Amino acid sequence: MDIMEKGVTKGAVVECLQECLGITAENTMAFGDYDNDISMLKCAKYSYAMENASSRIKEQANFLAPANTKNGVVETICQQLQIRLS
């Protein structure tokens, strides 16, 4: 269960960060695995559902990343930025 103040969402925070940093959804990457991530995924062109995410999240995301139990976020970021981990 998530308990938050009304109107506070991950998407609202991402939009605030985008505005403060002068970037757009075209320059944003987000990862989600549960319904509370949907608003955040909608703010990013590079929206990733984790492999172990709910089907609802997978429908909202533009891409699929390996499960978070397999370091999917780090693996995907490194792949996209062409960073090799040794």
Image (cartoon, rainbow, N blue to C red):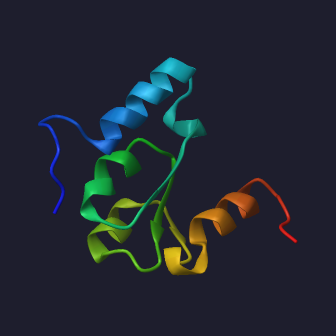
| x, y percent for residue 39 | 30, 47
Quadrant occupied by the C terminus: bottom right
Question: In the shown orientation, is residue 85 left or right of residue 75?
Answer: right
Question: In the shown orientation, is residue 34 left or right of residue 65?
Answer: left
Q: Is residue 75 above or below residue 81?
A: below
Q: Is residue 24 above or below residue 78?
A: above
Quadrant occupied by the N terminus: bottom left
42 or 8, which is in the foreground? 8
| x, y percent for residue 63 | 51, 65
Q: Is residue 15 above or below residue 81?
A: above
So how many labels did they put on this image? Answer: 0
Question: In the shown orientation, is residue 24 left or right of residue 8?
Answer: right
Q: Residue furthest left?
A: 6
Q: Is residue 73 above or below residue 43?
A: below
Residue drawn at x 56%, y 38% is: 26
| x, y percent for residue 60 | 34, 60
28 or 45, which is in the foreground? 28
Residue drawn at x 11%, y 36% is: 6
Question: In the shown orientation, is residue 8 left or right of residue 45?
Answer: left
| x, y percent for residue 61 | 41, 61
Residue drawn at x 33%, y 40% is: 11
Residue drawn at x 33%, y 55% is: 37
